Structure formats: structure tokens, C-alpha cells
Image (cartoon, helix red, strand yellow):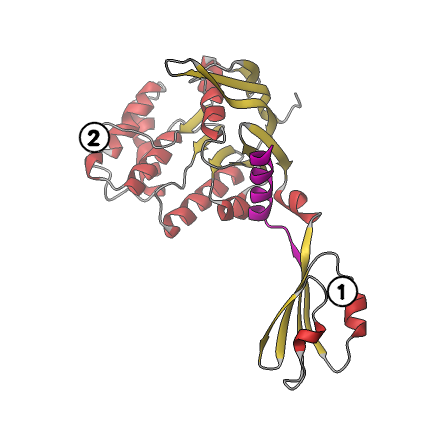
């Protein structure tokens, strides 16, 4: 374990026994990754991939079948590890007749905070997550997005070093998602470590320092998003100025596609085409644009999950 490792997951496996036939289901299989201090770490995968099981194990809510986890060097589960963490579970449930302010006061008391500190923190967090005007309204009258904001606030009440969020953007509109992304970035800028799961890939690309993809319980492709994507070229987009009287279809190389709009023709070339040689072979056209088409996080995600689905 390196000095700056805040979360470590080593060879984690979790197996459940389900139903009267005692069917064994492996939810997580030998998962390993580390999260560094101050990182925003994204954990992405389809429904049923093992994201929530991994997080619940990391939070000490369920015990692993094998493997181990630590938080800030403390073994999981342990009181020392839990005191350092703020946690938002997937689809949190709160008492309907509590207000958001009462929820935060309760959470502050559970962490042993004195009355003045927990009241100050509650007011700050309610304003930060956009619930200032609804702070004293019973949560049974909240929308799903408002409940998610209240959950984010309670995860931060103890000013934790590590914040673990399971699907924190769930139920939020685009503006709410941006506000949560901004909040996560602020936490990282303040030296906090944020680990969150999601299936909303643009949010991961926008703010994460590193990412891990999980599919069928197996963790793949852990690393910075840019590093994971930079090596794979899917093809090249080329825009040419081609006289309208000229048949642009004759210019398309094998495996390519083309679409004309006036004088401009947009070509999509497969990765095996030698673009420089193809352009040198053309006459009477003007090159407007040449841009390699790199693999996106969505492309990588689909490739990994489909590969695992066929395994």
C-alpha cells in the first residue's frame, strides 16, 4: 500500500446464495483497485455489474467472500474507517416526516458533533445543495431529485476525508447534475477523495481523474480516462471540397462512407486506410478538415461490456 493510497480493494469477491435451490451468484470476482488522496475516481458499469455490491462491501455493510478493503489504512469493517467516510447509498430512504434540516441534525448527533457545529454545518450544506428554502419541509413532500440532494448533504455532515457516492446523479435534471459535478470538483479541490459509481458516462469524462469499468463482477481498464482512450483510433473523418458535377462516390476507399452537402463531402474512413496516401491520390479537390476519430469512453464501455457478455 502506497503512502497516498486512501482506498484499497484487493482481490475482492462476493458470492450470494439465492432462492430455495441455493443458487450461487458471484456478484464481484477478484476486484482490485486503489484510489489516491485527492482523486475523483469513477466506477462505471451496467446495471447488475457489481458496482453497488463493491461499494456496500467497502462500507462494511456486507462482508466479502474473500479479499480485503482498507480506508485510510484502516481495515473494513471498522469504526475507525467509518468515521472518516461520508456515504450516499443508491436510492436512499429517509423518514418521511423528518425535514432535511432534522435529518442533518440527526446525522451530526450520530457523529458526536456538538450542537453549534452541527447546526452550522447543516445550514452550510443545505444552501450548498440547493435546499435552503425547503430545509424545514417534510421530506415526504420532496421530489426524487430533492431527496438525492438531501442525501448528498448528509454524506458531508461530518466533513469527511473520503466521500463515497453510489449513483449520486440519479434523479437529477441536467442543471442538478452540473451542480453535483461542481460540488464533487470543489471537494477534490479541497483535498477530499471522492469515489462514485454511475452509468452516466459524460459525467465521468467531465470530472474524473481515473476510472474503473466493471462488468459481470470483474474490474477492467483502471486508469486515467485520457490514457485509456488515447491508444485506440476508430477511423478518420475527412471533409473535402468536391465539385458538384464530380461523382464523389468514386472517391470513397474500401470500407469508407461519404455524404455530400453542396460542394462539401464528409468521408468516414476505417482505421486501416492510409489517409495520407489516399489524399495524395485525389485530384481536383480541396481538403477542408482531417480529424482522427478516437475511442470515446462510451465506445470503451460498450466494447468491454460486450466482450464480457460473450465470455
Q: Nearer the viewer, residue 214 or 105?
A: 214
Q: Quadrant of the C terminus?
A: top right
80 vs 311, left or right, is left
Q: Nearer the viewer, residue 97 or 216?
A: 216
Mark with earlier residue (1, 2): 2
Q: Secondary structure at mark 2?
A: loop
Residue lying at 65% horizontally and 46% vertically, measured from the top left: 229
Can I make out residue 68 in this image? yes
247 vs 278, left or right, is left
Q: Nearer the viewer, residue 137 or 58?
A: 58
Quarter location, residue 105: top left
**Residue at the spot of label 1:** 275
268 vs 193, left or right, is right
Q: Position of residue 275 (x, y in %)?
A: 76, 64
Residue range (magenta): 292-311
Asked whether residue 298 is drawn in magenta, I would say: yes
Q: Position of residue 97 (x, y in %)?
A: 18, 30
> In this picture, is 23 found above or below 267?
above
Q: Position of residue 123 (x, y in %)?
A: 30, 36
> In this picture, is 282 found above or below 297?
below
Residue lying at 23% horizontally and 27% vertically, measured from the top left: 95
Compute the Cα span from label 1 to label 2: 62 Å
**Residue at the spot of label 2:** 96
Can I make out residue 36 in this image? no
Asked whether residue 71 is drawn in magenta, I would say: no
Q: Position of residue 285 (x, y in %)?
A: 72, 80
Most common SS among magenta residues = helix
Residue lying at 22% horizontally and 35% vertically, measured from the top left: 139
Amino acid at each position: 500500500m502506497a503512502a497516498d493510497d486512501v482506498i484499497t480493494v484487493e482481490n475482492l469477491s462476493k458470492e450470494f446464495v439465492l432462492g430455495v435451490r441455493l443458487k450461487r451468484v458471484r456478484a464481484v470476482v477478484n476486484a482490485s483497485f486503489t484510489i489516491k488522496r485527492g482523486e475523483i475516481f469513477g466506477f462505471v458499469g451496467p446495471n447488475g455489474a457489481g458496482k453497488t455490491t463493491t461499494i456496500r462491501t467497502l462500507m462494511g455493510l456486507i462482508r466479502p467472500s474473500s479479499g480485503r478493503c482498507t480506508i485510510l489504512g484502516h481495515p473494513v469493517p471498522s469504526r475507525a474507517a467509518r468515521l472518516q467516510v461520508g456515504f450516499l447509498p443508491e436510492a436512499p430512504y429517509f423518514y418521511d416526516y423528518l425535514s432535511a434540516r432534522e435529518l442533518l441534525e440527526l446525522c451530526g448527533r450520530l457523529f458526536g458533533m456538538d450542537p453549534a457545529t452541527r447546526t452550522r454545518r447543516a445550514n452550510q450544506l443545505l444552501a450548498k445543495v440547493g435546499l435552503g428554502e425547503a430545509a424545514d419541509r417534510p421530506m415526504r413532500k420532496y421530489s426524487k431529485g430533492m431527496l438525492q440532494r438531501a442525501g448528498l448533504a448528509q454524506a458531508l455532515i461530518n466533513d469527511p476525508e473520503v466521500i463515497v457516492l453510489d449513483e449520486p446523479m440519479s434523479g437529477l435534471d441536467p442543471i442538478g447534475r452540473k451542480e453535483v459535478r461542481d460540488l464533487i470538483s470543489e471537494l477534490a479541490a479541497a483535498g477530499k477523495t471522492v469515489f462514485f459509481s454511475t452509468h452516466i458516462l459524460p459525467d465521468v469524462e467531465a470530472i474524473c481523474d481515473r476510472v474503473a469499468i466493471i462488468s459481470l463482477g470483474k474490474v477492467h481498464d483502471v486508469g486515467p480516462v485520457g490514457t485509456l482512450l488515447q491508444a485506440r483510433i476508430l477511423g478518420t473523418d475527412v471533409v473535402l471540397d468536391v465539385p458538384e458535377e464530380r461523382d464523389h462516390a468514386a472517391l470513397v476507399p474500401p470500407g469508407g462512407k461519404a455524404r455530400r452537402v453542396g460542394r462539401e463531402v464528409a468521408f468516414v474512413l476505417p482505421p486501416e486506410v492510409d489517409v495520407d496516401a489516399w489524399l495524395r491520390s485525389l485530384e481536383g479537390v480541396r481538403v477542408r478538415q482531417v480529424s482522427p476519430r478516437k475511442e470515446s469512453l462510451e465506445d470503451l464501455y460498450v466494447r468491454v461490456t460486450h466482450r464480457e457478455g460473450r465470455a
